[in-house]
Amino acid sequence: MPVADIDMVTGSGGHVNRKAASEYSTDLTRWRLKVHEGRHMWEYVEADVAATQHQTFAEKYWLGQDYELPKMSTPTCAQDTLDNGWEFFKRLQTQDGHWGCNDDGPLFVTSGIVIASYICGITFPEAMKNEMIRYLFNFANEEGGWGLWINSPSTVFGTTMNYTMLRILGVSPTHPVLLDARAALCRMGSARALPTWGKFWMCALGAYEWSGMIPLIPEPLLAPGFLPLNPGNWWVHTRNVYVSMSYLFGHRFTAQITPLVQELREELYDMPYHEIDWFAQRTNISDNDRLFPPTLLQKGLVNALCSYEYIKVPFLRRKALDEALFQVEMEVRNTSYLCIAPVNFASNMLVMLHAHGSNSHWVKGMADRIIDPMWMCREGMAASGTNGTSVWDTVFTVQAALDGGLAERPENHDTMLQALKFINVSQITENPLGVSQGYRQPTKGAWPFSTRDQAYAVSDTTAEAVRAVIQLQALDSMPKLVSDERLIEAVDLILGMENKCGGYSAFEPLRAPKALELLNVTELYENVMTESLYPECTSSVLLCLETFTKAYPHHRPMEIQATIGRCVRYLIKAQFPCGGWVASWGVCFTYATMFALQGLETVGLRESNSETCRDACSFLLQYQNEDGGWGEDLISIREKHYVQDPAGSQVTCTAYALTGLIAAHCSNRDALRRGIHWLMSHQQATGEWLPGSLEGIFACPGGMRYPNYKFHFTLAAIGKYIERYGERASFYKG
């Protein structure tokens, strides 16, 4: 076994603070992670508590602290690499059975929460303040300012939001980082050139005037449900953000003007605040921010919105605002105060403040949830894009252990049992209140991306969870915690989420035509007006149904086979001419092609009998680097073709490509061997793989971090390789 050696090896997170960030670093030995059913709560404990309650291995790892673990044997084959990697990764399992991590990246999530908290009168502990400052200082661009996501070029939106956040947290305007940020902001046109999303936040704070905004009218909420213009038919994240923003716009909500806000009015602009022609700023969007130039149709929509705002009918406005409030209340109630994501959590909290006051259970309940998306990264503290990845990462970890034959080993029994217990308690057991009135999809039987409290059904998370549970509970050593009835209920829900044209979306079937994207006035993102069809979600469903039909062959067999056929036809149709598929949740072609080839394998399609699979194999092999790995850049999602990562081969991309090629039964064994060699050579003596480029996507073109991907997807790839070719097929010297 890889842990037989009694010697210890020391590992380190290896993060080095930038000079400006160092002064805000707290005593990292005092941070503790509390968990409950997937919920994360980082706490800064007193020094005497820290001295008696030692940090766990996982806490040390995520904080970038030095850690010790038994020395592992030097790998000589793929099996050794798999064993060492698993011995490291299983130590990151939390006390409640899940594998948690950050999924940060967008640089406007934390700032939205901080601004909303400031308006609500909510203060942060000093340690949290310092670590949020440290995070932003570590990710400040050399030329000053911040972008839309970490390591992206500076924008007016990113710079204004994060500058404002830092000032709220107590950083002086004369601090060098803020001086650089202001200089960058001035070069880009100052906060006058904010995109609409940024204008909204500054209006709510009182550092911008509502007359300088494109009207976010609430009246579309009164449109008949069959019309695409009704927000109930939009993509779930866009819908939730718009509803709260339209409420606050309709009421012209502005916080109390404090001395700090008065100072921000001077610091954020390149001319005196009282001299700004606010109406002229409505369409003043910096080229640094705007993803695409506005079309004639979009310009016409903006003009129509401005005209409507002058002639609005008071009765309709009041009714629309009441409907917006109802929708926000339903969202907050159905998610146990969390909301679907921290982005609309922040704006929803302001809606609750305006409608119910700071002493209401609404605001107090949300205040208690601010900690949920916050994660202590190696660079500092930041809000993730969701309240974690708890279910998602855990079910993939279980599958990786199953693929590699690790799950049935006696020494892994407790690890797998704890994971099964967590998956068991995470299934959603009821539908949301007011399913149709709140534009919600049924959720009873589903698994969420993060936690049961968040309570949004996700097609691929549910599919992967069903697959993991069936396979894990098939082991003699595992109890049957999830009943047949609950698994059947989950599959019935999955079948109900299929799109009419075949294929699967993430949260709900398509409700509006893609032509609605022509009215996209977000300025920052593309393909965010409606749900989309995703190769990765569709493939997860195929893999789930294959596993399910073997275990439950008599449940709706005809319907399941029909669904499988439609999903396969969708995947074949969705393939790009280059031979790959493009993902919307991971980077990018390698990620989606991995899933697609696994999905096609469920119906027996492979390189030898399918032109689709042959083209996909050729596509992946074409981009294998000389060192044997693969490395794809995030920009591929925007360019719609494979773009090499300037940083070279990446652990995640290499794992994706290998898994896809193995699923397709690729005949080029040498390419597979070289890919496995690359993964072996980049494994550390501790058994881990080091962080690389951004692994994920939230909405095009924004990147996110999914740090557990480099573990469970890599372990799964190696395990599948061993299962297909044998443990010593990749003998490695050196």
Image (spheres, grey):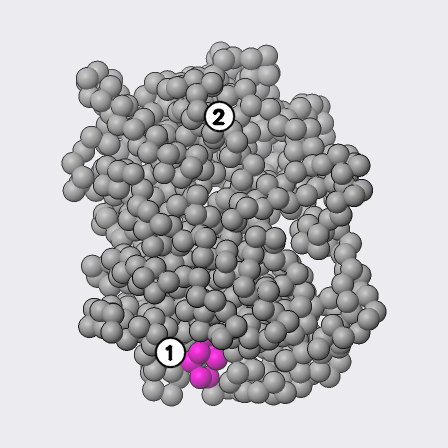
Kindly state the secondary structure of the residue where label 1 is placed: helix
- Res 270 → quadrant: top right
**Is 617 displayed left or right of 412 in the figure?**
left
Instruction: Give how far across and how far down residue 244 sits, in percent.
Output: 36, 30
Give the alpha-carbon distance from disc 2 to disc 1, as whole Å: 50 Å
Q: Measuring 56% from the left and 56% from the top, which residue is drawn there?
A: 97
- Which residue lies under the disc numbered 2? 364
Image location (x, y in percent) of residue 506 = 35, 54
> Who's the residue at 37% across and 23% down the image?
248
Is residue 608 visible in the rendered image? The answer is: yes
Q: Which mark is residue 712?
A: none
Picture coordinates of residue 671, whole percent (x, y): 55, 82
On the image, the x and y values in percent for residue 642 come to 47, 65
* Residue plotted at (43% across, 44% down): 454
Amino acid tagged 1: Glu
Sequence-earlier tag: 2 or 1? 2
Residue pictured at 67% horizontal, 68% vertical: 87
Going by the image, does 236 lie left or right of 49?
left
Q: Quadrant of residue 159?
A: top right
User: Picture quarter containing residue 265?
Assistant: top right
- The amino acid type found where label 2 is placed reads Lys
Q: Is residue 524 left or right of residue 533?
A: right
Which quarter shows the N terminus?
bottom right
Q: Residues within 10 Å of mark 2 (few under 14, many from 20)?
A: some
Q: Is residue 142 visible?
A: no
In this view, the residue farthest toward the right is: 7
Local crowd size for mark 1, using a 10 Å CA cut-off: few (<14), some (14–19), many (≥20): many
Q: Does 513 sit above or below residue 255? A: below
Q: Report which residue position mark 1 lands on.
A: 601
Q: Nearer the viewer, residue 182 or 209?
A: 209
For this view, does 62 lie left or right of residue 216? Answer: right
Stretch of the chain drawn in magenta = 660-666
